[in-house]
């Protein structure tokens, strides 16, 4: 099988989704029936981890470069795998339609349920409609838990009957624990020692760190909370800092970011428990990472979490801080119950493997190819004339940089011309009023004088002109396009 694996998101720093792609690629290359794996990446990207040697790298600038691979007979793969939700250009909707067979990977539909996570309603409508259309344009859908199949039907208005489940696993590095001295050293450098609870993720409301903080407020005062993530939620009255102040938690809660894998391992090994109170997850790798390192897990009984954790974690009702507090106290107290939980968690984690993920992904590819050949997938029947038209339209340089630069220049010049026209009419009106003997309206007060560079203490005024700026942009484009 010849696979085209769209991994353009690997130009970003390593996170959960990027880690999934690296591990799946490694195992796909080892499958006996895989003849060729080409990986689509943005040109000049530096993947956060080295790609397997067996893959062929296809560097692209834009969607048009992928269209050429999908539509030119000598380059066509057997199946095209869109591993993420690109929402930067409508042309990406063409890709699953133009491929001989296509699979779209759906990690979750959380953003489709939360318009408040977008700058405005218009941005959310665009994203929501884009994803709804994307899941209808392919032969098969790949998901990582059965709960996501429900999201496809409920939130994306897609066909759950074409979804295949391929559970994820733990990065192999997490199977090698750090030494106690290394754990202690790294935790000390991060600022945590003694009894602390670990949580992960940004402070979006659906992560429900608020429930965890309310539980923490009733735990002994020496117990602290480390959250490996960033504070991004800025809605007044709902921010993490406001809740911390309201609960009088002070420095008992600290957010840490910029951690590498070894730091995360150290925190997982050094904490008394991983708390995972999230209300919405498509899979949720952190709990099984904790299980791999023999750390007790307390998680919300929500969406995919019970499916993934099974009996390897203590589950609490979503949003129930009293029950969460009770379970965290049990972890802090230790004893046979906690040891039994750790053993069950270890067994659950061992049931997952990236080889199994790759095998199920390959099976999804086979179904997509069979469905495309039989013409039974949601994207069929597609008139050949429509397919050819889409290919032609997708090849057009909508985002050609020279065209965009010329359009931007024209907008600037138009605005300048309009401003000159307004000033001209204002001057004519003032002259007419003077001729009629009427006193013109007083001019607005002039702006304060700009300090001249003659004064050594005065800040230098930046030199700027539209012409110079355009020349710099053109020179940069020319340098980048040189082979």
Image: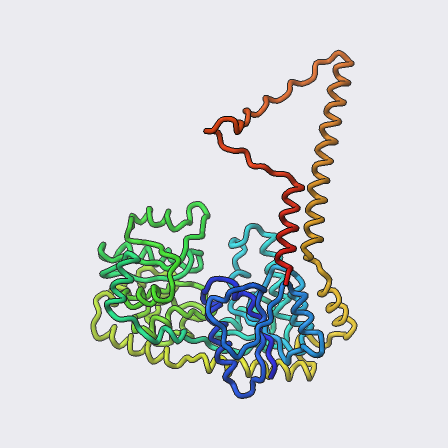
- Classify residue 248 as left or right of residue 261: left
Q: Position of residue 304 (x, y in %)?
A: 44, 71
- Classify residue 320 as left or right of residue 166: left
Q: How is the image coloured?
A: rainbow
Q: Which quadrant would residue 371 be assigned to in this image? A: bottom right
**Which of 20/206 is in front?**
20
Whether 419 is drawn above or below 390: the answer is above
Q: Position of residue 222 (x, y in %)?
A: 22, 56
Q: Which residue is pictured at 65% across the width and 55% down the height?
A: 478
- Classify residue 19 as left or right of residue 106: left
Residue sitting at the far bottom? 32
Q: Which residue is pictured at 45% across the width and 79% down the height?
A: 354
Quadrant containing the N terminus in the rendered view: bottom right
**Which of 128/193 is in front?**
193
Quadrant containing the C terminus in the rendered view: bottom right
Q: Which quadrant would residue 134 be assigned to in this image? A: bottom right
Q: Position of residue 324 (x, y in %)?
A: 31, 63
Whether 248 is drawn above or below 43: the answer is above
Residue sitting at the far top? 437
**Which of 373/336 is in front?**
373
Q: Which residue is pictured at 73% across the width and 74% down the height?
A: 382
**Which of 172/323 is in front?**
172
């Amino acid at each position: 099988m010849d696979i085209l694996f769209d991994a353009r998101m690997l130009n970003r720093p390593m996170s959960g989704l990027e880690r999934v792609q690296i591990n799946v690629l490694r195992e796909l290359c080892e499958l006996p029936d895989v003849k060729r794996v080409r990986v689509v990446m943005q040109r000049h990207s530096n993947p956060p981890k080295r790609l397997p040697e067996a893959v062929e790298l296809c560097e692209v600038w834009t969607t048009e470069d992928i269209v050429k691979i999908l539509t030119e007979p000598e380059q066509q793969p057997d199946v095209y795998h869109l591993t993420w939700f690109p929402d930067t250009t409508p042309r990406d909707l063409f890709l699953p339609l133009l491929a001989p067979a296509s699979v779209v990977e759906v990690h979750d539909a959380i953003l489709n349920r939360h318009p408040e996570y977008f700058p405005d309603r218009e941005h959310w409508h665009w994203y929501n409609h884009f994803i709804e259309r994307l899941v209808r344009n392919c032969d098969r859908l790949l998901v990582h838990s059965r709960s996501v199949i429900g999201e496809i039907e409920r939130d994306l208005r897609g066909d759950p009957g074409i979804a295949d489940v391929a559970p994820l696993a733990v990065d192999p590095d997490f199977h090698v624990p750090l030494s106690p001295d290394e754990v202690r050293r790294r935790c000390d450098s991060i600022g945590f020692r003694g009894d602390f609870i670990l949580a992960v993720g940004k402070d979006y409301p659906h992560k429900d760190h608020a429930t965890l903080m309310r539980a923490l407020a009733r735990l002994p005062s020496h117990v602290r909370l480390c959250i490996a993530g960033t504070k991004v939620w800025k809605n007044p009255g709902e921010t993490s800092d406001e809740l911390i102040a309201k609960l009088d938690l002070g420095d008992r809660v600290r957010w840490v970011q910029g951690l590498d894998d070894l730091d995360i391992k150290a925190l997982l090994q050094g904490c008394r428990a991983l708390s995972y109170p999230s209300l919405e997850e498509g899979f949720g790798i952190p709990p099984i990472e904790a299980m791999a390192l023999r750390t007790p897990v307390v998680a919300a009984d929500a969406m995919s979490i019970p499916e993934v954790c099974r009996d390897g974690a203590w589950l609490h009702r979503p949003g129930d801080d009293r029950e969460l507090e009770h379970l965290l106290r049990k972890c802090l107290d230790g004893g046979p119950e906690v040891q039994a939980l750790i053993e069950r968690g270890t067994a659950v984690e061992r049931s997952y493997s990236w080889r199994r993920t790759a095998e199920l992904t390959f099976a999804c590819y086979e179904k997509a190819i069979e469905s495309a050949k039989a013409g039974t997938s949601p994207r069929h029947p597609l008139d050949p004339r429509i397919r050819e038209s889409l290919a032609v339209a997708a090849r057009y340089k909508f985002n050609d940089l020279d065209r965009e630069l010329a359009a931007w220049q024209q907008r600037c010049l138009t605005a300048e011309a309009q401003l000159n026209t307004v000033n001209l009419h204002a001057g004519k009106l003032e002259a007419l009023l003077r001729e009629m003997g009427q006193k013109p309206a007083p001019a607005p007060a002039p702006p304060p004088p700009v300090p001249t560079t003659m004064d050594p203490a005065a800040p230098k005024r930046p030199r700027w002109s539209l012409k110079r700026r355009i020349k710099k942009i053109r020179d940069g484009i020319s340098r980048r396009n040189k082979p």
